[in-house]
Image (cartoon, rainbow, N blue to C red):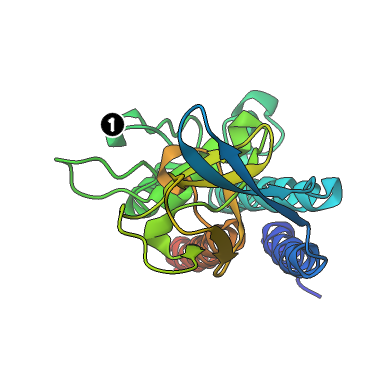
Amino acid sequence: MAIDAFEIPKKQVGRAKRCIDELDRGIGNYFAANPVKQTLRVDRARGVQVAIRHYSEFPDELSERVDDAITKLRSALDQAVYAASLQIDSSLKGYERAERGLAFPIADEPNKLDFKSVPAALHGLIRGFEPYPLTPGRSGGNHILWCLNRLANIHKHRFLVEAQVGKQSVLALSIGPVSEGPPAFAWNAEGRELSATLPLGSPTMVMAMINQCIAFAEPELVRNANIVLVLLDMYGVVDRIVGDIEAETLRILGEQSS
């Protein structure tokens, strides 16, 4: 039976998808358990009423699923480049320093991509993935890849409940019309509290949530974005890249043997 040089990166991608699926189910169970205590506070000194939604702790095991998915996806990129490099240039095998340089490069600028010991035959393909952030005034960039690398490097993930009114995740309801305009929303990450504030004279206010989710607090490009949807985007990009690297490697090997 022929050995599949890309078995490890493909397995990593599959494991990452299972982590994302487990996370999705876990988040659904978290919200189904109604982890919210809602209160209405009156601050007479400020002349406002404040509706508060306090969320319970996000389960540690689900935080671990996020970390596992990110780590596996980032590793799959490196492992695919490693496998391809050794297939294309067998002289690299066994040279520890050279093998340490066989990784998928991601940088803040296109001209800062560091290929180290990755064979030149793969440089064009990798550049085509545009592994650098989207930047105003510059064409190209893949914010999904850049954010994946950023999250893998910071080794920490802070969670917040989505509180962006523009994304239709929060609906503040009042009994009767509100003439003072929309409520002022705020998210207290440390206290896990979402608040909506209106003047005291306004009708009594309650809050309802639409499509509430767990969201990333950083980096900027995915801040407040639904964690599961972001990870699924990352999974799709990495799965495609691993497949493209494998296909290009087979093409190069075919040329070498002809």
Which residue is labeled 1 in the image?
Answer: 111
Farthest residue in the bottom direction?
A: 1
Residue at image point 33% right, 54% down: 128
Q: Is residue 91 above or below residue 225?
A: above
Residue at image point 47% right, 39% down: 48
Is residue 87 visible in the rendered image? The answer is yes
In percent of width and height, residue 179 lies at: 30, 58
The secondary element bearing badge 1 is classed as helix
In percent of width and height, residue 192 lies at: 68, 41
In percent of width and height, residue 81 lies at: 56, 48
Farthest residue in the top direction?
A: 97
Is residue 235 visible in the rendered image? The answer is no
Crowd tier of the residue under label 1, counting other residues whose Cα lies within 10 Å: few below 14, some 14–19, many 20 or above: few
Q: Specify the quadrant that holds the N terminus.
A: bottom right
Amino acid tagged 1: Asn
In percent of width and height, residue 61 lies at: 85, 50
Which of the 4 image quadrants contains residue 168?
bottom left
Residue at image point 64% right, 33% down: 99
Q: Relative to 21, is 184 on the left or the right? A: left
Q: Specify the quadrant that holds the C terminus.
A: bottom left
Q: What count of labels does the image hold?
A: 1
Farthest residue in the left direction?
A: 137
Which of the 4 image quadrants contains residue 24?
bottom right
Front position in the image: 180 or 98: 180
Q: Is residue 54 above or below residue 251?
A: above
Front position in the image: 13 or 182: 182
Q: Relative to 247, is 199 on the left or the right? A: left
Which of the 4 image quadrants contains residue 213?
bottom right
